[in-house]
Amino acid sequence: MWIINGLKVLMVCYGHGHRIMTRQKMMKKNLSPVFIIPVHMAGVPANLGPLLTLAQEHGLYFIEDACQAVGGSYQGRPLGSFGEVGAFSLNFYKIIGTGEGGAAITSDRGIYDRIRMHHDTGVSFWGSDMPADTPVIPGVNYRMSELLGAFALVQLGRLDGFVENMRAIKKRVYGMLEGTPRPAPQNDPDGDCGTTLHFQFDSVDQATRFEERLREQGVSATRPINTGRHVYSNWEFVINKTNICDQGCSWDCPRYQGTATYAPDMCPNTLDILARTVGVSTDPFWTADQVNTLVDKVETAAQGK
């Protein structure tokens, strides 16, 4: 969507101890950032503290992508509520779903009106509560139907129970394991959605063998590096700077003075961590016996039996 709206993205490489690029450094590269988009992947809250500080110090908008972390929190506050906008997904593969669709939240009335007009172009014509001084913008009609909205309300009532169960399962599994395999770092275990168990290894070879041994025991395990377009190096339209039109924004926009370059290997730390990590999805309906069985299989796979 940011490409369609004529914006460029500056991807920040992830890595333990990796420093965040300051606005001053961006300006030296002729880059003029407008907003920060932290992504809470696989139910794990991003480390929002330093990002919020950066946004506040330099007047940047803060837009949270909580599509994979509906119901999660950071330091006791719900994910999606820290910045100007929070975005959530309700497709069939998320924590709660309506088949397709999603939701956006904001506490800013101006942003709220623009979101309404963008998702439903008819709002500006028949919206009785639309402020008269709100500039009209074109919409794309990506609105959900009232029927899907009703499904979403029912699912919302189940959300807390789902997250509480999965979070408890994740804590229990991590607590039962000693030494190897090593759980991946968590920014806020109490706010983690618990949807995915992540195990981290010192080498890609160790992670690959562990993944294979889990699968041999019937456990669905996946290394994040193999999750397709969740990984930036598979974003062909970004790497190749393609858009709907051959020329113009966002890649050749005359209003943008900076030059952003992209390459599949531009973030080696990120790719290395994704390749050395193995993920296992949890289920809020697992019984205690099922959790114990999973732990036994994880330990067996880690020992190479």
Image: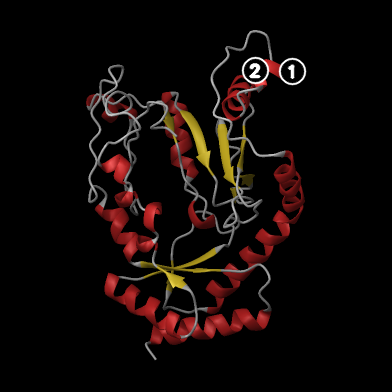
What is the C-alpha distance between the residues marked 2 and 1?
10 Å
In percent of the image, x 25 and y 54: which residue is there? Answer: 268
**What's under tag 1, amino acid-wise?**
Asp
Residue ID at (61%, 38%): 81
- Could you tell me residue 244's position as x and y percent? 35, 32
Q: Amino acid at mark 2?
A: Ser
Can you tell which mark lies on residue 129? Answer: 1
Mark 1: which secondary structure? loop
Spot occupied by residue 263 in the image (x, y as percentages of width and height)? 22, 45
**Residue designated by label 2:** 124
Q: Is residue 20 left or right of residue 85?
A: left
Establish if 210 lies above or below 190.
below
Q: Is residue 182 above or below residue 48?
A: below
Question: How many residues crowd mark 1 within 10 Å: few (<14), some (14–19), many (20+)?
Answer: few
Q: Nearer the viewer, residue 146 or 108?
A: 146
**Residue 63 higher or lower than 298, as above or below:** above
